[in-house]
Image (cartoon, rainbow, N blue to C red):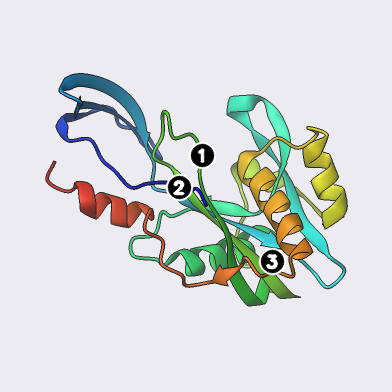
């Protein structure tokens, strides 16, 4: 079975080209097969996302404005790993409560993804959350979150929307299709919610420290 292979070209120079509000643009020079290559990349803190599935096999989706693509797209709840030292599972639980006022009794890892490996080091861990119940709304939603729309959508219908290209948010597509396929296999592909994540941004940063 194919599997991504960890390997890192030596970094000979690294500088921040742009320091952003959420992430930076970094210019790195690498030694690749004896040749110096220069690459710009988005240095991203990483993120988590949640496929929240209720007892009726409906997935919770939110519609939110995303300015870079000029669309109000449908998404699964998600958020940045922007709290120092916070484990991915706790981050996912926090985001689910903050965005859609839900808590879950059953958590598992559904998928891990690199969103755009040619230009960003962003990694997202996607969880499956089941055994759902409501939680008190304690998050003051502002900016793009102020007018989000929430909707329970049958998993089969959500998968069909992805396949018909009506839903194009990357983590949402991966999460929905992974859940749809995993359900057909009796959920045998799920991993424990606290499974090691070798490509977690904190692990990545430890590896690259001092370069």
Which badge, 3 or 1, is on the more N-terminal residue? 3
The percent coordinates of residue 148 (x first, y second) are: 73, 46
Mark 1–mark 2 Cα distance, whole angstroms, equals 6 Å
Q: Which residue is mark 2?
A: 123
Q: Which residue is mark 1?
A: 115
**How many C-alpha atoms fall within 10 Å of the one at disc 2: few (<14), some, or many (≥20)?**
many
Vertical side of 47 occupied by 16: above or below: above
**How many C-alpha atoms fall within 10 Å of the one at disc 1: few (<14), some, or many (≥20)?**
some
At horizontal 42% and vertical 29% (from top left) the residue drawn is 118
Which is closer to the viewer, label 3 or label 1? 1
The percent coordinates of residue 209 (x first, y second) are: 17, 48
At horizontal 38% and vertical 55% (from top left) the residue drawn is 200
Mark 3–mark 1 Cα distance, whole angstroms, equals 26 Å
How many numbered discs, if any?
Answer: 3
Vertical side of 27 occupied by 153: above or below: below
Vertical side of 4 occupied by 35: above or below: above
Q: Is residue 33 left or right of residue 54?
A: left
The percent coordinates of residue 156 (x first, y second) are: 86, 53
Q: Are marks 1 and 2 in contact (CB under 8 Å)?
A: yes
Task: Find numbered disc 2 in the image and state the secondary structure of the residue it sits on.
Answer: strand
């Amino acid at each position: 079975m194919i599997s991504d292979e960890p390997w890192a070209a030596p970094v000979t120079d690294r500088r921040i080209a742009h320091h952003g509000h959420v992430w930076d643009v970094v210019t790195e020079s690498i030694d690749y097969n004896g040749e110096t290559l220069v690459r710009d990349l988005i240095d991203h803190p990483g993120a988590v996302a949640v496929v929240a599935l209720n007892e009726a096999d409906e997935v919770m989706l939110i519609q939110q404005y995303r300015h870079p693509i000029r669309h109000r797209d449908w998404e699964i709840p998600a958020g940045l790993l922007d709290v120092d030292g916070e484990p991915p599972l706790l981050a996912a639980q926090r985001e689910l409560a903050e965005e859609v006022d839900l808590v879950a009794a059953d958590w598992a890892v559904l998928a891990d993804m690199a969103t755009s490996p040619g230009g960003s080091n962003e990694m997202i861990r996607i969880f499956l959350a089941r055994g759902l119940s409501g939680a008190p709304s304690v998050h003051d939603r502002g900016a793009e979150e102020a007018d989000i729309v929430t909707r329970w959508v049958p998993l089969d219908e959500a998968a069909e929307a992805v396949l018909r290209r009506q839903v194009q948010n990357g983590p949402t597509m991966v999460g929905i299709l992974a859940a749809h396929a995993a359900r057909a296999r009796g959920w045998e592909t799920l991993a424990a919610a606290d499974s090691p994540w070798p490509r977690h941004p904190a692990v990545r940063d430890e590896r690259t420290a001092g370069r």
